Image: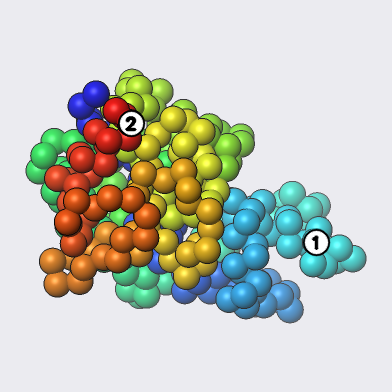
């Protein structure tokens, strides 16, 4: 099957957003709300097992501070807190505090020049996705992606495959014409459950996750002056991720 589309996770995959982006934004929102909550880097690593910002706040409340009583109905409290966090996150992007990971801009440009279809499948909110794309790639960057499947468009978030099923349905493509890009265990579970061959670029929070189901695992996508380090899979002598390697990975994945 010929490769027709690339589907990208966002947080941790396109940009190292978690530690210095979302975590900081959560803490700023907590402080602004008068809450004495502080999510350290280590604690946030544990909380990343829960996908979705609102779900993460709820899990924290239930697990770490079960005696906390919110000042308004719980669901509304979490919703407002998460909205504030999104504002702080987009402000961080505006400050240039969250750059793209190595190779991301180059690969997206290569894919566009080759007329490959592009999509996003993520648990983060549409506002977060658009802010990241605009601040790192330019005001028209969201239009590069035929589908931006984000946030609450499906009820079950990763590791459920629903967000990928949604993106594939919107594009009208079978999974074997596509390739997914992820960075985490939740991500690889979601993508492979949707029958998508998946390339993983690990980060500090996910480098010890089980990626045995991935078609390829690297430390980042690489640049000509910044080669990647292969962790799992055959890179065919390549030193960075480009369309030639991606097509080889896709062909191998679909033909055993």
Q: Is residue 182 above or below residue 132?
A: above
Residue 219 falls in image quadrant? bottom left
Percent from the top left, x then y, of residue 28?
A: 58, 75
Question: Percent position (x, y) of residue 186?
Answer: 55, 48
Q: Is 248 located above or below residue 54 in the figure?
A: above
At 18% from the left and 62% from the top, the residue drawn is 239
Image disc number at residue 256? 2
Disc 1 crowd, CA 10 A, few/some/many (<14, 14-19, 20+): few
In the rendered image, the quadrant that contains the N terminus is: top left
Q: Secondary structure at mark 1?
A: helix
* Disc number lying in front (2 or 1): 2
Under circle 2, the secondary element is loop
Is 135 on the left-hand or right-hand side of 45?
left
Tell me the CA gap for discs 2 and 1: 43 Å
The colour scheme applied to this rendered structure is rainbow
The residue at 26%/41% (across/down) is 249
**For mark 1, what is the residue?**
63
Q: Nearer the viewer, residue 153 or 63?
A: 63
């Amino acid at each position: 099957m010929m490769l027709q589309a690339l589907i990208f996770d966002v947080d941790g995959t396109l940009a190292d957003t978690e530690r210095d982006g979302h975590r900081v934004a959560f803490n700023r929102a907590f402080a602004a709300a008068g809450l004495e909550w502080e999510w350290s880097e280590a604690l946030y690593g544990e909380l990343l097992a829960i996908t979705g910002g609102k779900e993460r706040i709820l899990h924290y409340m239930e697990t770490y501070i079960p005696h906390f009583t919110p000042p308004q109905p719980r669901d509304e409290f979490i919703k407002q807190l998460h909205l504030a966090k999104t504002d702080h996150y987009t402000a961080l992007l505006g400050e240039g505090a969250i750059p793209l990971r190595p190779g991301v801009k180059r690969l997206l440009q290569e894919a566009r020049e080759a007329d490959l279809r592009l999509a996003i499948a993520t648990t983060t909110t549409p506002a977060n996705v658009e802010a990241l794309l605009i601040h790192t790639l330019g005001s028209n960057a969201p239009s590069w992606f035929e589908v931006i499947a984000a946030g609450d468009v499906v009820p079950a978030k990763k590791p459920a495959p629903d967000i990928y099923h949604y993106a594939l349905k919107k594009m009208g493509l079978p999974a074997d014409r596509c390739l997914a890009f992820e960075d985490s265990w939740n991500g690889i579970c979601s993508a492979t459950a949707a029958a998508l061959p998946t390339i993983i670029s690990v980060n500090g929070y996910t480098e010890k996750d089980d990626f045995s189901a991935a078609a390829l695992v690297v430390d980042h996508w690489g640049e000509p002056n910044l080669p990647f380090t292969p962790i799992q899979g055959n890179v065919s002598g390549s030193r960075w991720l480009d369309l030639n390697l991606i097509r080889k990975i896709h062909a191998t994945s679909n033909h055993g």
